[in-house]
Amino acid sequence: MRLLTVGENEAGQRLDKLLGKYMDKAPTSFFYKMLRKKNITLNGKKAEGKERLEVGDAIRLFLADETIDGFSSMAGKTGAGKLPQNIGAKQSRKVNPAAGGAKSKKKLPLRLRPEIIYEDKNVIFFNKPAGLLSQKAKPSDISLVEYLTEHLLETGEATAESLRSFRPGICNRLDRNTSGLVAAGKSLRGLQELNELFRIRSLHKYYRTIAAGSVMDKQHIEGWLQKNEKTNQVQIFKQERKDALPICTEYMPLKQLTYNGNPYTYLEINLITGRSHQIRAHLASIGHPLIGDTKYGSPKINAEFRKNFGLKYQLLHAYRLELPELTGALSNLSGQQYIAPLPKEFMNVLNRG
């Protein structure tokens, strides 16, 4: 028999959903059969599977360990036992290398290791360096998600066993070569509430970039964006088009710059809609490509900045995050703003303009 004790990160979800995470290779019909036969019980009683779990609930699996582990993709990577009692409780600091993400910090070169801007028991905000993936593109990749997982394993806020029922995750993604703020949920409530803020766009995201040309006034531009999944590129249209999504971008000049006699502008961008490659493609479409942008920018400009500054990627940085008035698990973030300092490569270009 295996006992699972429901903690904060499992509470609120249905019993059958949790079982589906814990034994992710088992068909749903298996859970309902085991519930009917009382081979799986909730607080010592027969359950249907639709019950909403609460902290402290006891789930008993009257199944062989071989059966449980055979239905889990994490088999052999975790020790049998309990789900964590409390996400904030300090548990074992011993990291299981097979738990997913362990040793990722050692594999990442120093220049790709993110800085923690803010952290509490529910959320964590990173300053992601350019070159680090937000999420894996292929199994061998180490991304910010793996870095987050290892961080929580090292601090004891997650265990290999707890990762079977809840995986911390990021709430906003940045392109690999875009740096700056990425918000992540450490607890179930933190992840859910933060994701909802991004979904309804009640928080404000501001970026910094350097674009070609002179921009003298604050601008609000709209359009339609269509993405080609095969080439991972987007096109911008002024008029509505089939399969294109509406976009809205605001930008404001902060400083006029000159390099080799050519004008550039240091901009702050308010990303109102957050579509793939929106800032890069939208600004390029109106004649202000980002310097260093190999996908939508000017090859001539990029070559000049690579030669003079060693620049290998676009200067685009998620600089500031402003949160609205909040209640619930994120009430301590109510009305706050968080800033990710500009990377050294960005400052080198900015200070010489």
Image (spheres, rainbow, N blue to C red):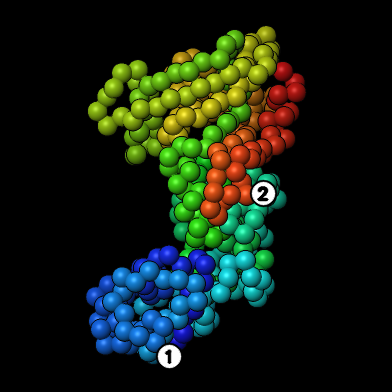
How many numbered discs? 2
Residue 32 vertical placement versus 106 (above, below): below
Give percent across and percent down for residue 273: 44, 31
Q: Is residue 241 left or right of residue 177?
A: left
How packed mark 1 is, by other alpha carbons closer than 10 Å (few <14, some 14-19, many 20 or more), is few
> Which residue is painted at 72% across and 29% down in the image?
347
In the image, residue 280 sits, relative to residue 72, either above or below, namely: above
Examine the rendering and report whether any part of residue 68 can be seen: no
Residue at 75% over, 21% down: 352
Q: Which of 8 and 350 is in front in this view?
A: 8
Q: Of helix, strand and loop, which one carries label 1?
A: loop
| The N terminus lies in quadrant | bottom left
Q: Identify the residue at image location x=49%, y=14%.
A: 287
Q: What residue type is labelled 2?
A: Tyr
Q: Mark 1 points at which residue?
A: 1
Residue at horizontal 59 percent and vertical 53 percent from the top = 123
How far across and down, in percent of the image, does residue 218 sit?
Answer: 56, 15
Kindly identify which residue carries mark 2: 118
Report the side of 245 relative to 202 (left or right).
left
- How far across and how far down the image is residue 299, in percent? 53, 22
